[in-house]
């Protein structure tokens, strides 16, 4: 860390905003297993540029926002806007998006069938059980033509918004991180390629249908408390994540072709 050069800049920014950022302290970044590999690479690249970063991996999707709200970490990276909005409402937080990360494709996978047309009447379909990812699963089923949703419900869709179900599919709601296990039992499963790769149970590229970039609201965000928006450590870290060729190589290794950079859209 080049303290003599960075400290005046940090102090100047701090005096301007009314907040003094601790330039000597490591930037604390919270994440989950699915996003850790590329962030670990970013941490290594940041260190080469004199920026000290501590990566903290959480095992669930609640703790990263609780920790950020309490100030135990400076930023987290694991959620998209719909998830953040729901977390803010449920937890009484005032967390805000700072910068865009990647968007992961989500797909429909089947161990038993090679196409959506082969699904029988009464097929069992497993989707995520939390309010936000469940809505994404329902949107994907609508894209597949398996159900019709009320117009305009978007990512807030629930099963009550289904107005047509011609194959009478039976929807099973499963914790999102456990959907890979449902692959062996259900006829069709909503799947997250990054979790599928971590499980090594089946090919993440084998989905019968992907949702892709057609839902930009699902771009993963760097999320902060509003008071951290002028932290130069944060700006530097995000710039490395978005523009380092080494980090891009790590993203490509982790996700293959099943992601897009959200900051380009």
Image: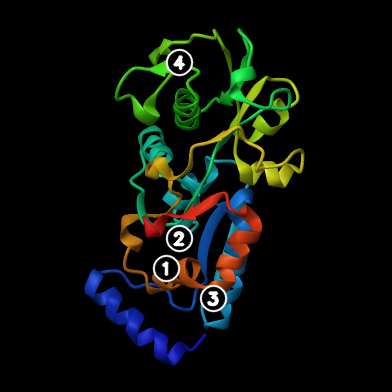
Depth check: 89 or 178 in front?
178
Residue 142, compared with residue 197, is above or below; it is above
The residue tagged 1 is 234
Mark linked to residue 159: 4
Q: CA distance from mark 2 to mark 4?
A: 36 Å
Q: CA distance from mark 1 to mark 3?
A: 11 Å
Q: How is the image coloured?
A: rainbow
Asked whether the residues under the numbered discs 1 and 2 touch, taking CB atoms below 8 Å apart as contact, a structural biologist would say yes
Q: Secondary structure at mark 1?
A: helix
**Neighbours of disc 1 within 10 Å: few (<14), some (14-19), many (20+):** many
The nearer-to-camera label among 1 and 2 is 1
Asked whether, in this view, residue 213 is left or right of residue 175, the answer is left
Mark linked to residue 161: none
Asked whether the residues under the numbered discs 2 and 3 touch, taking CB atoms below 8 Å apart as contact, a structural biologist would say no
Upstream in the sequence, badge 1 or badge 3? Answer: 3
> Residue 113: percent from the left, percent from the top?
69, 23
The residue tagged 3 is 46
Asked whether the residues under the numbered discs 4 and 3 touch, taking CB atoms below 8 Å apart as contact, a structural biologist would say no
The residue tagged 2 is 74
Asked whether, in this view, residue 123 is left or right of residue 106, the answer is right
> Residue 140: percent from the left, percent from the top?
48, 29
Residue 222, compared with residue 184, is above or below; it is below
Upstream in the sequence, badge 2 or badge 3? Answer: 3
Q: Secondary structure at mark 2?
A: loop
> Residue 257: percent from the left, percent from the top?
58, 53
Quadrant assignment for the C terminus: bottom left
């Amino acid at each position: 860390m080049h303290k003599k050069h960075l400290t005046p800049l940090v102090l100047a920014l701090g005096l301007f905003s009314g907040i003094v950022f601790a330039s000597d302290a490591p930037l604390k970044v919270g994440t989950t297993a699915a996003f850790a590999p590329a962030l670990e690479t970013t941490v290594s690249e940041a260190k080469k540029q004199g920026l000290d970063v501590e990566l903290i991996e959480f095992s669930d999707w609640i703790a990263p926002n609780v920790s950020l709200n309490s100030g135990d970490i400076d930023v987290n990276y694991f959620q998209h806007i719909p998830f953040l909005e729901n977390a803010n409402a449920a937890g009484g937080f005032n967390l805000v998006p700072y910068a865009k990360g990647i968007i992961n494709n989500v797909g429909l996978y089947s161990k038993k069938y090679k196409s959506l047309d082969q699904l029988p009447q009464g097929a069992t379909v497993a989707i995520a059980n939390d309010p936000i990812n469940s809505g994404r699963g329902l949107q994907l089923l609508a894209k597949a033509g398996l159900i019709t949703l009320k117009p305009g419900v978007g990512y807030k869709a629930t099963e009550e918004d289904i107005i047509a179900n011609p194959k009478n599919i039976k929807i099973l709601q499963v914790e999102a991180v456990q959907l890979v296990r449902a692959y062996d039992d259900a006829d069709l499963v909503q799947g997250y390629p990054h979790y599928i790769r971590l499980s090594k149970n089946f090919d993440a590229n084998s989905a019968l249908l992907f949702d892709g970039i057609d839902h930009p609201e699902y771009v993963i965000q760097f999320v902060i408390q509003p008071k951290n928006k002028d932290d130069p450590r944060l700006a530097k870290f995000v710039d490395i994540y978005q523009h380092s060729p080494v980090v891009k190589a790590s993203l490509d290794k982790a996700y293959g072709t099943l992601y897009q950079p959200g900051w380009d859209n």
